[in-house]
Image (tube, grey):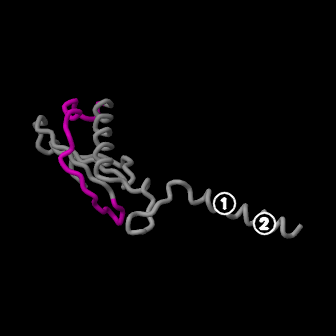
């Protein structure tokens, strides 16, 4: 009886371990620990920022000319200890020079934080 309980406990523990590790648990080529779904890349940041710009145009927050503008740069910056993607767009059709360059801020996971013309 005790052996059955011990065996059942072991099976339950092993099953729990496998479930908790999940299918998103991976190791990169140098065998370091990573969770690939948590770290965005430049392509994803650019795509997400482009979609944000389109949404802002739809909501009449930006001029319609912004919808055809492609990203001019994407870089990871740190603000107050937090890494963020900053994707910039330059729209030469805008006559006000202070509003020609739009910055879209995203989390490292690619989630929208804010957009402005100052980059800060």
In the image, is residue 50 above or below residue 16? above
Region rendered in magenta: 60-83
Q: Which mark is residue 7?
A: 2
Disc 2, SS: helix
Q: Dot 1 corresponds to which residue? A: 16
Of discs 1 and 2, which sits in the foreground? Answer: 2
Asked whether residue 43 is drawn in magenta, I would say no
Q: Earlier in the sequence, mark 1 or mark 2?
A: 2
Q: Quadrant of the N terminus?
A: bottom right
Q: Residues within 10 Å of mark 1 (few under 14, many from 20)?
A: few
Asked whether residue 77 is drawn in magenta, I would say yes
Point out residue 43 in the picture as x, y percentages from the top left corner. Answer: 29, 48
Q: Quadrant of the C terminus?
A: bottom left
Q: Nearer the viewer, residue 79 or 72?
A: 72
Q: Nearer the viewer, residue 44 or 66?
A: 44
In the image, is residue 69 above or below residue 15? above
Q: Which mark is residue 91?
A: none
Point out residue 17 in the picture as x, y percentages from the top left corner. Answer: 63, 62
Figure quadrant of residue 71: top left
Point out residue 7 in the picture as x, y percentages from the top left corner. Answer: 78, 66
Q: Is residue 80 left or right of residue 102?
A: right
Residue that appears at 28% across and 32% down: 57
């Amino acid at each position: 009886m005790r052996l059955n309980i011990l065996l059942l406990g072991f099976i339950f523990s092993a099953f729990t371990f496998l479930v908790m590790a999940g299918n998103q648990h991976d190791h990169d080529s140098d065998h370091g620990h990573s969770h690939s779904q948590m770290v965005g890349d430049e392509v994803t940041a650019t795509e997400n920022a482009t979609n944000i710009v389109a949404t802002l145009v739809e909501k009449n927050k930006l001029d319609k000319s912004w919808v055809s503008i492609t990203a001019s740069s994407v870089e990871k910056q740190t603000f107050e200890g937090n890494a963020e993607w900053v994707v910039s767009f330059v729209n030469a059709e805008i006559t006000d020079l202070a509003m020609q360059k739009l910055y879209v801020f995203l989390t490292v996971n690619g989630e929208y934080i804010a957009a402005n013309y100052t980059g800060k």
